[in-house]
Amino acid sequence: MNFSLYIAKRYLFTKSSNNAINYITIIATIGIVMGSAALFIVLSGFAGLKDFTLEFTSIIDPDLKAQSATGKYFKLTNEEANKLDKLKTTTAYSKVIEERVFVAYEHKNYPNAYIKGVDENYQTVTTIDSVIFYGNWLTSKSNQVVTGLGISNSLSIGVLDYGKKLNLYVPKPGKGQIKSLKDAYNSFHAVNVGIFDVNEALNDKYIYTPINMAKALLEVPENSYSYIEFKLNPDATEEEARTEILSVLGDKVTLKNKAQLNDALYKMLNTENLAVYLIFTLVLIIALFNVIGSIIMMILDKKSNLKTLYSTGATLKHIRQIFFYQGSLMSVLGGVLGLTIGYIIVSLQKAFSLVMITPSLPYPMTIKWENLILVFVTISVLGILASKIASSRISKSLIDIN
């Protein structure tokens, strides 16, 4: 066994005759354990919040979305549609038309809505029906709509109220002087049959309609669409699907996956996660100053023993290695113990919902191996650096008996 490592383990696991040094060592170890446990718990909490947030957002996001590379719409020919039907990497696709509309209901107006016309395959591509908490999904080739919860609350829209019509308005395409209101807007009377609830942004934005109704309201050219949304075959990779889809649609479209569709949200969540990691790493750095202090106190306490070791042939390098190994072992073992405690706490939260956000919603936690590795590497590197700094304080004048 390595001489310096053997002595370091003896010093680490043996009580000092000086109680003050024992207390300092215990405090330093507790700081490492609690710091690593807290860092892992917080990272698991943010991972859980991220998954929880994206879980609802991705409900109405397809696996891949093809949108026009230039302009609002792109044309899908019958030949291209037949080829899309035969793709092996996708199980279904839905054609979508989207445009901003002005909504009026009774004596209230809502100018910030977007109409989203979808075909009968939309429920196959997404799980939109799972977020309709009141009413039902719309029927194709009808004047039915499904509104977001935010729009519904703003306009006081009910469900299946046939005595009150929901009016949708969009400016008419074209040029020339407008002589009357009818020349300025296309309008459509609709009946709300359902209300969906995903998140605040989407609830305040979308009104779903059958695609034929959207085409008529917006005067979209034949076979033209805003998007085509795809559901991938579970046996196919995203890259394989991209290659197949682009071989049919060419460069007139760009393809985006769920992460790219929620780029701003992903960036925000990742930035918050990084900020929390850096803050808790700073806390760990402060805690590791106790390790430096503990090692320096141990050096002073063992001064006579070090002189003996030096006299019997141990070099200055060996003596420095003793305390470097001692501090490194304290940091690594404390980190492992802290991670174990953190893992147990996170597991208990997942199993028994110890902390609740609301009476019915437990705080979400997600255990990720990358977080375990990140915390272990962080505490190990910082502990090794602290040990190196402390052990470098040993000089020849400190242990030279002459």
Image (cartoon, rainbow, N blue to C red):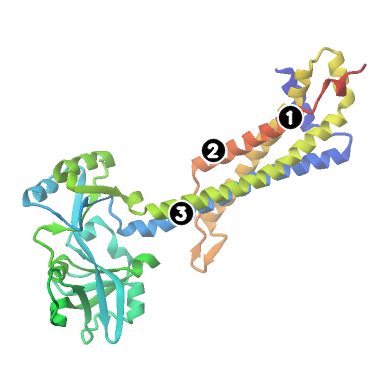
Residue that appears at 49% across and 57% down: 364
Residue under label 3? 268
Q: Nearer the viewer, residue 255 or 160?
A: 255
Distance from the alpha carbon under mark 2 to that under mark 3: 23 Å
Distance from the alpha carbon under mark 2 to that under mark 1: 22 Å
Residue that appears at 28% across and 62% down: 128
Query: Dot 2: what SS?
Result: helix
Nearest to the eye among marks 2 and 3: give it: 3
State the quadrant of the N terminus: top right
Residue 136 location, x and y as percent?
25, 72
Query: Looking at the image, do the residues carrying marks 2 and 1 touch, with CB atoms under 8 Å apart?
Result: no
Amino acid type indicated by mark 3: Met
**Left or right: 79 as drawn, with respect to 11:** left
Amino acid type indicated by mark 2: Ile
Amino acid type indicated by mark 1: Gln
Residue under label 2? 373
Does 86 sit above or below residue 209?
Answer: above
Residue 168 location, x and y as percent?
21, 76
**Mark 3 or 1 closer to N-term?**
3
Quadrant location of residue 165?
bottom left
Query: Dot 3: what SS?
Result: helix
Does 132 sit above or below residue 348?
Answer: below
Residue under label 1? 326
**Left or right: 309 as drawn, with respect to 338:** right
Residue that appears at 69% across and 31% down: 328
Instruction: Answer few, some or many: residues within 10 Å of disc 2's Cα (few below 14, many 20 plus, some between 14 and 19).
Output: few
